């Protein structure tokens, strides 16, 4: 069965650089969620989209932005990267009122 | 706002012994409840979920969980653990409000299996 695809799987950036993370949801899923998991932490919700519109927003820094495109894939754009942004970033997808399926994550390291 | 408490940060169990991981949630109505497992550096795998109906839910890998509304709990159990069960376990709660289905996770319980 198709799963959530995230790219890249690993990303290394310098401070103050920009990063773009991509998420391809399971076919026919209309909702995408982004979570951030710091080292030794639980995943924290960042933002979600339903039918290409932002549906909910969590603890997402102003330096981050995201969108969902017409093909339902989503991108998380992160600017002015800080050391504290180093984390595992998960994307999840679902259809309405169903469970979220998580991708394998993108490990971002900021040096 | 919803919240989840996993009181046990780290549990050590002998292989073949039974396991119970505790989870308490806070939510104004009946929530969606989930247990996820995560191996080091890996993604989150759904073990089981509770949406409605039977309060005892069966999941993958021989896990089960029981929803107890009166105790606001959703404890995870397994009758006999295997070495491969060593991982981090997260309990999560999701709201039933459209547009607010984000998951709130507990801080996780790290499970160590000893021979």
Image: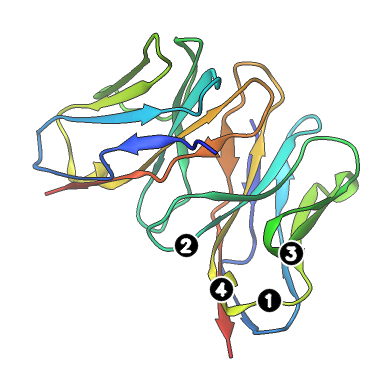
What percent of the width, then of the height, locates residue A64? 28, 25
Q: Secondary structure at mark 2?
A: loop
- Examine the image and state in which quarter residue B58 appears: bottom right
What is the spatial separation of the Cα atoms under label 3 and label 2, in whole angstroms? 17 Å
Q: Secondary structure at mark 1?
A: loop
| Residue underneath mark 3 | B62
What is the spatial separation of the Cα atoms under label 1 and label 4, in whole angstroms? 8 Å
| Residue underneath mark 2 | B39
Q: Are dots 2 and 4 in contact, CB under 8 Å?
A: no
What is the spatial separation of the Cα atoms under label 3 and label 4, in whole angstroms? 12 Å
| Residue underneath mark 1 | B81
Q: Are marks 1 and 4 on the same chain?
A: yes
Local crowd at mark 2 within 10 Å, few (<14), some, or many (≥20)?
A: some
Q: Earlier in the sequence, mark 3 or mark 4?
A: 3
Residue A96 lies, with reference to residue B27, above or below; the image says above
Residue B86 lies, with reference to residue A35, above or below; the image says below
Local crowd at mark 3 within 10 Å, few (<14), some, or many (≥20)?
A: few
Q: Nearer the viewer, mark 3 or mark 2?
A: 3
Q: Residue at x 73, y 83 (%)?
A: B17
Q: Are dots 3 and 4 in contact, CB under 8 Å?
A: no
Q: Are marks 3 and 2 on the same chain?
A: yes
| Residue underneath mark 4 | B84
């Amino acid at each position: 069965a198709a799963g959530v695809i995230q790219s890249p799987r690993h990303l290394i950036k310098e401070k103050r650089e920009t990063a773009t993370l991509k998420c391809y949801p399971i076919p026919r899923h209309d909702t995408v969620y982004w979570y951030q998991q710091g080292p030794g932490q639980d995943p924290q919700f960042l933002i979600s989209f339903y039918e290409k519109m932002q549906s909910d927003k969590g603890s997402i820094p102003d330096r981050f932005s995201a969108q969902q495109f017409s093909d339902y894939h989503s991108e998380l754009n992160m600017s002015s990267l800080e050391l504290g942004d180093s984390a595992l970033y998960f994307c999840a997808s679902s259809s309405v009122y169903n469970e979220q399926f998580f991708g394998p994550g993108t490990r971002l390291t900021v040096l | 706002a919803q919240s989840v408490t996993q009181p046990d940060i780290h549990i050590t169990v002998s292989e073949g012994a039974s396991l119970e991981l505790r989870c308490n949630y806070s939510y104004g109505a009946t929530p969606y409840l989930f247990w996820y497992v995560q191996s080091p550096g890996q993604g989150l795998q759904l073990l089981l979920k509770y949406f409605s109906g039977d309060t005892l839910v069966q999941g993958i890998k021989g896990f089960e969980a029981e929803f107890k509304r009166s105790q606001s709990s959703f404890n995870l159990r397994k009758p006999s653990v295997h070495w491969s069960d060593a991982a981090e376990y997260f309990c999560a709660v999701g709201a039933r409000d459209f547009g607010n289905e984000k998951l709130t996770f507990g801080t996780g319980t790290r499970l160590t299996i000893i021979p």
